[in-house]
Image (cartoon, helix red, strand yellow):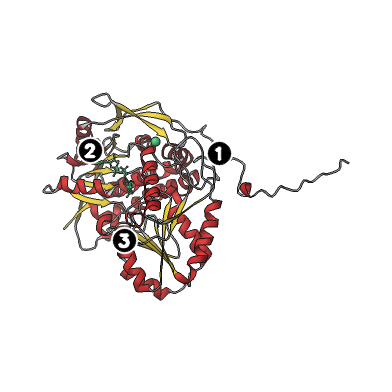
Amino acid sequence: MKKQTTTTPKLDFTSKWAYAPSPESTDHVQLKEQYDLFINGKWVKPVKGKYFDTVNPATEKKLASVAEATQEDVDKAVKAARAAYENVWSKMPAKERAKYIYRIARMIQERAREFAVIESMDGGKAIRESRDVDVPLAAAHFFYYAGWADKLEYAFPGKTVSPVGVAGQIIPWNFPLLMAAWKIAPALATGNTVVLKPAETTPLTALKLAEIIKESGLPDGVVNIITGAGATGAAIVNHPGIDKIAFTGSTDVGKLIQKAIAGTNKKLTLELGGKAANIIFEDAPIDQAVEGIVNGIFFNQGHVCCAGSRLFVQEGVADVVIRKLKDRLESLIVGDPLDKNTDIGAINSKGQLETIKKYIKIGINEGAEMYQSSCAIPSKGFFVRPTLFTNVSQSHTISREEIFGPVLAIQTFRTVEEVIEKANNTPYGLSAGVWTDKGSKIFSLTTKLRAGVIWANTYNKFDPTSPFGGFKESGFGREGGLHGLAPYLVMN
Ligand code: NAI
Ligand code: MG
C-alpha cells in the first residue's frame, strides 16, 4: 500500500476566504442579438430604426442591442393597450384573467434559472441574489395577485371598484425582473392594461418576460414592453392616452414626472430613493445584527432603495459592532456575479460606479474615517470594495444623500429619543431597521420613525403580501399586498 502523505495547509490569511471558482453555466441562456419592441403581442421594429447596446457590467462586453422607442412607438404601444383594455381585458371575467396571471407565474418558475443568469449578466448582481431573491419573488408576486383578481369586492368591502385603464410603468435597474412583476401583476389583476419600460442598462429580463407573456397566450396588447432611456420614459409619462403612471427610480425623475402630469387626470404612484436608518440597541443580538447590517447595505451592491445605509449603534456596543463588521467585511467576496460564492457583484454601470467613488471621496474629504475591505477586485468591469465610514456626523454628505452603493455611514447614539430624532432627520422615509431584545422598544420606535417599512431584528425581507412604499421624498402609494391593488382601481 502506498504511504499516504498529508501536507499541512499553509496558513495564509489572504486565502482564508478563497473558494474554488463555481460559476453558473450560461449554456441554457438564450439571448437574441437584437431585441425589437413588444407591442400588441408582436415584436416590432422601432419607427426610427435606432438601437442601443446593453452591456454586462462585470465584463464590459455587449450582450445585445435593444430598440430605442421614440414617441411614435410609445403611441403605438399605448393605442394597443387601449384597444386591448376596451375590447378584451376589461370585459373578461376576473377568474379568467387570473388564469393568465397564474400561467405567467408558473412559466417564470419553469424558466427561473435562465432568468437568474440573465439578470446577473445584464445587471451585475450576484447570482445568489438573482436566483434566491429576485426570481422567486417575481413569481410569488404573480401568484399572489392572480389570487386577488376575482376577489376585489372582498378586498374593498362596500365599494364598487373598476380598473383605471392603461397604466404606464417605468422601472429602474436595481431589481429589473422583480420591479416588472411588482408593476405588471397588480395592474393585470385589477383589469388594467400596461405599457412598461425597463431601465436602459437592464432591459433583458423584461424582454424575456415579454417572450413568456407571448407564450402564455395573454391577449395581444394587454402587456406591451418597450425599451429606451429617459426620453422614452418621458414620452410614456406625457402621452395623453395613459391613465396611470407607476414609477420607481430616482427622486429627481420622480419630481419631474409629478410636475409633468400636474393638471392632468393621470393617477400616480412614486417609489423613490431612501436613506434608511438601521438602529442597533445595546440589548440586540449582536451577531445577528451584524449579519443584518451586512445584508442591509452590502446586499445587491447597495443598489437598494431601502438599503440600511445609515447605521446607528448605541454607544455601549459601538466598538464591538464596528470590530465585528470590519471582520465580516473582510470575508465578503467581491467579483464575478455568476459565481455562486460571490457576495457582491458588479456595480450596474460605469456612471453609478463613478457616483459611488465620488461619495467615498467626499466622505474622506469631509473628515469621516474610511475602512474598506482588503479584498481583491477584478481589474475589468465595474467593481468597488465594500466600504464603511466611522466618525460620521448628521451633517456629513454621506449621511444625508443616497449613494446607492455598498457604502455604510456609521453614527452612535445614547438614548431612544436621540436616535429617533437622528433617524428622522432626512428628506427620505422609505424604510428602517430596529435591533433590540425588547418588543416594547420595537413598538415604541415603529410608531415614531417616519418610514414606510420598518424591519425588526431582520432587514431587507420582502413578501408579496406586505405593502411597500415611502413617506416624504421617498414617494407615495404602496406596492404589494392588498394596498398594492388600490392605485390601479377607481373606487366608488
Ligand atoms: P433614473 O430615475 O434616471 O432611472 C429610473 C428609470 O426612469 C429608468 O427606466 C429611466 O430610463 C427612467 N427615466 C429617466 N429619466 C426619465 C424621465 N425624465 N421621465 C421618465 N422616465 C425617466 O435613475 P438613474 O439615473 O439610473 O439613477 C440615479 C440615482 O437614482 C441612483 O444613484 C439612485 O440614487 C437613484 N435610484 C433609485 C432607485 C430606487 O429604487 N428608488 C432605482 C434607481 C436609481
Ligand atoms: Mg446591462
- Crowding at mark 2 (Cα within 10 Å: few <14, some 14-19, many 20+): many
Quadrant holding ligand 2?
A: top left
Quarter the N terminus occupies: top right
Q: Tell me residue 422's x, y (percent).
A: 33, 66
In this view, the residue in front, 219 or 478, is 478
One can see residue 102 in this view: no
- Dot placed on the residue nearer the N-terminal end, 2 or 1: 1
**Contact (CB < 8 A) between labels 2 and 1?**
no
Instruction: Tell me where residue 150 appears, x and y as whole percent.
Output: 29, 53
Assess whether mark 2 and mark 3 are in contact (beta carbons under 8 angstroms): no
Is residue 185 shown above or below 292?
above
Residues 336 and 76: in front is 336
Q: Position of residue 334 (x, y in %)?
A: 51, 45
Report the Cα–Cα distance between label 3 and label 2: 32 Å
Q: Height in image: 429 above or below 258?
A: below
Which mark is drawn over residue 23?
1
Q: Is residue 92 above or below residue 286?
A: above
Q: Give the residue furthest to the right.
A: 1
Q: Residue at the location (43% across, 50% down)?
A: 406
Q: CA distance from mark 2 to mark 1?
A: 41 Å
The residue that mark 2 highlights is 81
Residue labelled 3 has its Cβ within 8 Å of some atom of ligand 1: no
Identity of the amino acid at label 1?
A: Pro
Q: Amino acid at mark 3?
A: Gly
Which of the two discs, 2 and 1, sits closer to the camera? 1
Residue topped by disc 3: 452
- The furthest residue to the top: 49
**Picture residue at 46% right of the left edge, 55% below the top:** 295
User: Do the residues under discs 1 and 3 have CB atoms within 8 angstroms?
Assistant: no
Dot 3, how many residues are within 10 Å of its Cα: few (below 14), some (14-19), or many (20+)? many
Q: Residues within 10 Å of mark 1 (few under 14, many from 20)?
A: some
